[in-house]
Image (tube, grey):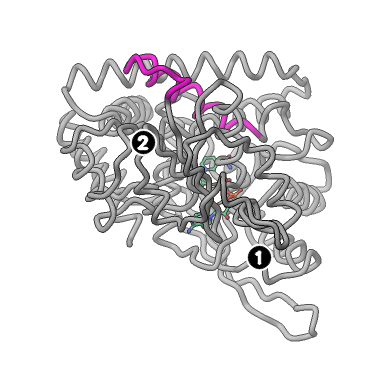
């Protein structure tokens, strides 16, 4: 799987449809800057291991680069380039004045101690310090990074600059310049998009079954919001596998999270200690979850989860792509042919970057907003963006992803041309 090749396929499809200016198309095929760094870390055992770190700054025509940092053993440059590109598109879809960037370290953080993760983060920050900053490039959390890691970046960057710079990253704890509502923002934004889709399709939410792959920040919050709104969550999974309520009953994500936190995996909800809840849950694999007969499928883990190999077996009518690049273009072609409706990542998961934008604005103003204000502003942006993307879908008679790309590319094109 090459996510950057997938991103290029999506770009080409939308560019052809809208007849994007050739010079803009050529420009957007490549990132502006690629920063690749070696990160020598003295491990707890006294040996030094050298990790690879990346920051890709894709496009900043509309504002500073913006995008998360991922710590994952499979992170590589192609992945980071794709994620940076999608960030540029996403910020333009929801019309916030930011460009696209992304970064990461090829590392399995589960194998590092807390001290090692902190030190690795500080080394990475020192190496990136000339390239990031509130006016240049603003990182944030992504897979296996969190508010604590953002706090270490603030601290290290501030030491280099000689004063506290809260706006260098977003996704910080509230006590260190974070925004109300940031933690759950991606899930909440996806929830608004899903509700709009359900409204368009005139589905009855009480009868609508949902399966969520990935039970981290994004997967947990969207599952929790859907459960509270009356949807039936029938399957959930994490990297170690999943659980399915074979009787089609709704499962409460909070209970599942409580068990996961206690036992270390979702599967423990099926068997806690020696007591097995065989009446309600069945243990399933991640692949099985994707093929369940549900109304709505939500991939919320890593890219290419739905690919050419398994797309033909996806039964859900609606897919809300909360993970970045969760569906490959080949899979999407197959799914669209079968009449599936796909809410693409660049729209569905944009709630995170929208509230990151709010956090950055609050840091620059030194003035903080209450939760209701954050949620109200987020809802307006998500609902308006959905309407605009839907209108373009109808105008060009295309799918929602291509429509979102057309909207974003037209905005980026205008910004580039105005600056020429
Ligand atoms: P996270 O680290 O909080 O959670 C990731 C989850 O995925 C974990 O539950 C993990 O166990 C699970 N997972 C890993 N490999 C898996 C596999 N092969 N099958 C099933 N589950 C697997 O990360 P997150 O922040 O929730 O991000 C999830 C996705 O959403 C990523 O694609 C990320 O880029 C995207 N995203 C996140 C945000 C955000 O604000 N956190 C914003 C936009 C997009």
Pick the quarter of the image with the C terminus: top left
Q: Which residues are magenta?
A: 184-207
C-alpha distance separating marks 1 and 2 = 30 Å
Across the whole image, how many numbered discs are drawn on residues?
A: 2
Q: Residue at x 66, y 62 (%)?
A: 124
Pick the quarter of the image with the N terminus: bottom left
Q: Position of residue 416 (x, y in %)?
A: 35, 31
Q: Front-most of 366 and 218?
A: 218
Q: Residues within 10 Å of mark 1 (few under 14, many from 20)?
A: some
Q: Residue at x 29, y 54 (%)?
A: 310
Q: Position of residue 393 (x, y in %)?
A: 24, 22
Q: Front-most of 330 and 279?
A: 279
Q: Position of residue 236 (x, y in %)?
A: 53, 45
Residue 420 visible: no
Secondary structure under the numbered disc 1 in the rendered image: helix
The residue that label 2 is drawn on is 319
Q: Residue at x 68, y 27 (%)?
A: 181
Quarter holding residue 361: top right
Residue 316 visible: yes
The residue that label 1 is drawn on is 109
The answer to whether 149 is drawn above or below residue 339 in the figure is below
């Amino acid at each position: 799987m090459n996510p950057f090749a997938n991103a290029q396929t999506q770009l080409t499809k939308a560019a052809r449809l809208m007849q994007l200016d050739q010079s803009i198309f050529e420009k957007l095929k490549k990132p502006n800057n690629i920063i690749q760094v070696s990160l020598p870390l003295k491990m707890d055992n006294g040996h030094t291991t050298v990790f690879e770190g990346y920051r890709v700054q894709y496009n900043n025509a509309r504002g500073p680069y913006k995008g998360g940092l991922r710590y994952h053993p499979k992170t590589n440059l192609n992945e980071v380039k794709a994620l940076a590109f999608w960030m540029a598109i996403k910020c333009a879809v929801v019309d916030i004045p930011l460009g696209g960037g992304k970064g990461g370290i090829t590392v399995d953080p589960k194998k590092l101690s807390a001290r090692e993760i902190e030190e690795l983060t500080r080394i990475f920050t020192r190496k990136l310090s000339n390239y990031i900053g509130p006016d240049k490039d603003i990182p944030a959390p992504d897979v296996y990074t969190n508010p604590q890691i953002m706090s270490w970046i603030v601290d290290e960057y501030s030491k280099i600059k000689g004063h506290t710079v809260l706006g260098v990253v977003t996704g910080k704890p509230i006590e260190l310049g974070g925004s109300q509502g940031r933690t759950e923002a991606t899930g909440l934004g996806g929830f608004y998009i899903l509700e709009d889709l359900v409204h368009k399709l005139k589905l009855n939410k009480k009868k609508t079954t949902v399966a969520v792959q990935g039970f981290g920040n994004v997967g947990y919050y969207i599952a929790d919001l859907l459960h509270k709104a009356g949807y039936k969550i029938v399957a959930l999974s994490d990297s170690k596998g999943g659980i399915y309520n074979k009787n089609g009953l709704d499962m409460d994500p909070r209970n599942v999270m409580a068990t996961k936190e206690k036992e270390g995996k979702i599967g423990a909800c099926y068997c806690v200690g020696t007591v097995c809840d065989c009446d309600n849950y069945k243990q399933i694999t991640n692949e099985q979850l994707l093929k369940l007969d549900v109304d709505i499928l939500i991939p919320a883990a890593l890219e290419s989860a739905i690919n050419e190999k398994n797309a033909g077996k996806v039964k859900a009518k609606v897919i809300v792509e909360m993970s970045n690049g969760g569906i490959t273009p080949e899979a999407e072609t197959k799914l669209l042919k079968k009449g599936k409706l796909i809410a693409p990542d660049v729209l569905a998961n944009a709630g995170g970057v929208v509230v990151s934008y709010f956090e950055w604005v609050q840091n620059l103003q030194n003035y903080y907003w209450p939760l209701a204000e954050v949620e109200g502003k987020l809802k307006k942006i998500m609902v308006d963006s959905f309407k605009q993307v839907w209108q373009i879908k109808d105008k060009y008679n295309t799918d929602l992803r291509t429509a979102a790309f057309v909207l974003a590319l037209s905005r980026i094109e205008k910004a580039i041309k105005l600056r020429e």
